[in-house]
Image: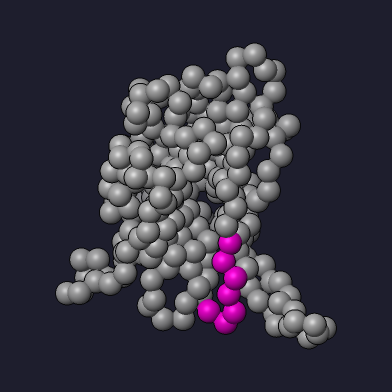
Amino acid sequence: MKKHTLIILLFFIISNSVFGQTKINKEKVKTLEPYIGLGILDKQNSDKSIKIDHLDYDEIPKSLDFRGTVVEAFKWTDSNGENILIQTVSGSFNWKDYNKNSTEFTLQDKSELYVYLFEKSNSEKAFKKKWRVYDYIECFGEDFSADFKPKATTITDLDNDGITEISMTYVLMCRGGMDPGILKIIMFEGQTEYELSGETMIGCGHIENPYGGEFIASDNLQKKQDFNKFLKEHWDRNKCEE
C-alpha cells in the first residue's frame, strides 16, 4: 500500500513539473523575475550558418546598461564583431495623465518593451550600445499588454554581406472587445531600420471572414527587395492572434 501511494505521489510531482511550465512562465511575467524565457527566437527562419548562443540572465555582462526585465538574450558573431541582443519588458504600471494646464489627472495604465543591440569589434575590449528600440502602450479601463511574439525574432544574412539582420516582432494591445492589436516587425542591418507596421488578424481559421492583418511598409524597403520579401512572409507567419 505504501509503495502504491509513493508511485502515485511521484507521478503527481512529475506531471506538475512538466505540465505546469506554462503557468509558471505566466507567473514570472506577472512578478517580472529576471529572465522570463518566453522562447522568442525563430530558429527555423533564422540563418542556420550563424551560431546563435542563448544567454542566461547571469551570463549577460554586468557592464551593459539596459532597462526592463529580460525576456531573452542572444549572442553571435558577424563581420562587425560580437553581438549581444537583449529584449526586455517593463510589465504593467500606473501613470498620471495630467490635463493640459491643470493639476487634475486621469490614472492610466502603461506597459513598455525594449530591444538593445550591443556590439564589440575585434579591436575593442568592451561592448558598446549600437541601437535601442523602445515602444509602449497606454491604456485605461481595458485589457492591455506590450509583448514580443513567441518564436518571431530572427537573425539572418539575407544579402550575404557578412552583416546580420535582426528582426523582432511584437504586439501592443489596448481593447475591451475583439479589435485587432498593433503589430510591428522591425528589422535592423547595422544602423539602418526597416519596418512593417499594422494590425493583427482576428479569427484566422476560426471564422468565415477574418479581419485585420493589414500593414504599411517603410519606404526604404522598396530598395531592398530581399528584405521586403522576407519581412512580408514573416508578417504572414505572425499576423494571426492565437
Vertical relation: 125 (above or below) 226: above
| For residue 198, side relative to residue 85 (left or right) | left
| For residue 9, side relative to residue 116 (left or right) | left
Residue toward you, 56 or 150: 150
Q: In which quarter of the image is residue 121?
A: top right
Point 61% across, 34% down: residue: 130
Give percent across and percent down for residue 60. 64, 33
Q: In which quarter of the image is residue 41?
A: top left
Instruction: Give the image's coloring scheme.
Output: one colour
Vertical relation: 195 (above or below) 81: below
Residue 2 visible in image? no
Q: Among all residues in the image, which is located at the extreme left?
A: 208
Point 50% across, 39% down: residue: 192
Residue 139 shown in magenta: yes
Q: In which quarter of the image is residue 187?
A: top left
Give percent across and percent down for residue 112. 60, 59
Give percent across and percent down for residue 44. 31, 37
Q: Among all residues in the image, which is located at the extreme right?
A: 103
Give percent across and percent down for residue 144. 52, 71
Residue 25 visible in image? yes
Residue 89 shown in magenta: no
Image label count: 0
Q: What stretch is highlighted in magenta?
A: 136-142
Vertical relation: 223 (above or below) 123: below
